[in-house]
Amino acid sequence: MAEVKQTNDNKEIYKTGQGEQNMGSTDEKQYVAFELAHEEYAVDILSVREIIRRTDITRVPKAPPFVKGVINLRGTIIPVIDSHLRFKLHPEEITDNSRIVVFNMDDITIGMTVDYVTEVLRLSEDQIEKQHSVNSIDNLFIKGIGKVEDRLLIILNLEKVLDLGTQQAKE
């Protein structure tokens, strides 16, 4: 079980079975963790605009296969990527937990379907191993592997995942 304690300089130390991790460190970032096809993924929270319930998605003719379509989010039309198709994963049933994570990348707003959002967490640089080939996801989409207690999180390279010009995942 994890334990949090205060140091003399009022920084929080997060104690796990892997040792102590300084939660007041400047080299840590917050991530939004979510599940796809029974694997856990994470993205930098600074790229996340909002997380919304799954809604009706309108198909767009001649779009890449992994582009599910578009949604109307409070008057703004946003393209939505089907993460299962983008990563060549088996489709999962849409449930009450299914979400669309809306990202702001540069001046572009785009959504991505996820099976469900699990949590927001902090990871320090020493908890992240750089790019590895995992599952059937191309290395191009992976920024690193986060280690949290006994879990591994695939940290996505959003610039590559959300690049609509990339046809890597075409079937």
Image (spheres, rainbow, N blue to C red):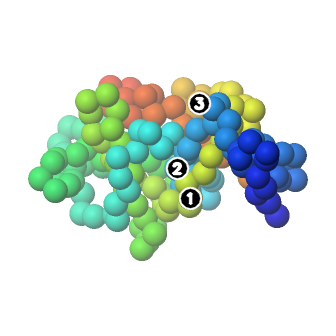
Cα–Cα span, label 2 and label 3: 14 Å
Front-most of 63 and 122?
Answer: 122
* Residue 32 disc label: 2
* Residue 143 disc label: 3
Q: Please tell me how crowded label 1 is: few (under 14), some (14-19), or many (20+) other residues with Cα within 10 Å.
A: few
The residue drawn where x is 43% and y is 28% is: 159
| Circle 1 SS class | strand
Q: How many marks?
A: 3
| Circle 3 SS class | strand
> Where does the image place residue 112, in percent across and percent down from the top left?
38, 48
What amino acid is labelled 2 in the image?
Val
What amino acid is labelled 3 in the image?
Lys
Tell us which disc is closer to us: 2 or 3: 2
**Cβ–Cβ below 8 Å for labels 2 and 1?**
yes
Front-most of 56 and 59?
Answer: 56
The residue drawn where x is 33% and y is 38% is: 104
Residue 160, above or below 171 = above
Q: Please tell me how crowded label 2 is: few (under 14), some (14-19), or many (20+) other residues with Cα within 10 Å.
A: many
Cα–Cα span, label 2 and label 1: 6 Å
**Cβ–Cβ below 8 Å for labels 2 and 3?**
no
Which residue has dot 1 on it?
119
- Left or right: residue 43 compared with residue 96: right
> Where does the image place residue 135, in percent across and percent down from the top left?
65, 42
The residue drawn where x is 36% and y is 42% is: 103
Sequence-earlier tag: 2 or 1: 2
